[in-house]
Amino acid sequence: MKPEFKEFIEEHSTFDSPHRALLEWAFEEAETLKDAQDRLKEVNCAGCSGPAPIYNYEVAQEMAKYWSYIQDALEEYEDATGEYWTPKDGNFLQYVWFTYEWFASDLARKIEDALEESEEK
C-alpha cells in the first residue's frame, strides 16, 4: 500500500473501526485516490461488495463495540436526510451493513474533497 494511502487511513479512522476496515479494503487494490473513491462508492453489503468483516458472524456478536458507530451513522443519516433509518426486519446485521454503507459514502466524499484540494494547489 502506498505511503500516502496509509496517511489518509490514519487521518480518517481509528484502529478497529468500520472506517478503517473500509479504507483498508478500498486502498488494497487502488493505484490512485480516485480508484479508492470509486471502490467506496460501490459498497453494497447485500450484494457482497465490501470489506470481509461485515459478513462475519463475529460482528453480530460484538454489538457493544459497533453500537456507537451505528448510532453515529444513524444520526448523520437523519441530519442529512431528515429521516430515521430502520431495518426492514429488525436484523442487527442490517444495522451493521447500513453503517458500513453510510460510512463508505462519507469516506468517498472525503476522498473527493482531498482530490479537489490537491487540484487547487
Image (tube, rainbow, N blue to C red):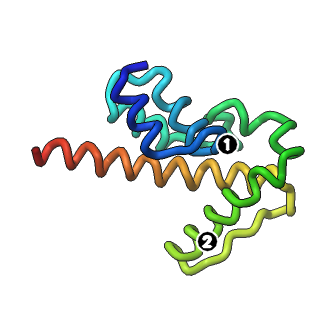
Front-lying residue, 33 or 86: 33
Q: How far is disc 2 from disc 1 in space, using C-alphas?
A: 20 Å
Q: Position of residue 94 (x, y in %)?
A: 77, 53
Q: Find the residue positioned furthest to the left.
A: 121
Mark 2 lies on residue:
75
Left or right of residue 57, residue 23 in this image: left
- When asked about the image quadrant of residue 85, the answer is bottom right
Q: What's under tag 2, amino acid-wise?
A: Glu
What residue is drawn where x is 41% and y is 24%? 30
Q: What's under tag 1, amino acid-wise?
A: Cys
Which numbered tag is attached to residue 30? Answer: none
Please tell me whether residue 30 is drawn above or below residue 92 in the rendered image. above
Please tell me whether residue 83 is drawn above or below residue 7 in the rendered image. below
Q: Find the residue positioned furthest to the bottom.
A: 82
Front-lying residue, 56 or 15: 15
Q: Position of residue 117 (x, y in %)?
A: 20, 48
Left or right of residue 118, residue 44 in this image: right
Of marks 2 and 1, which one's residue comes earlier in the chain? 1
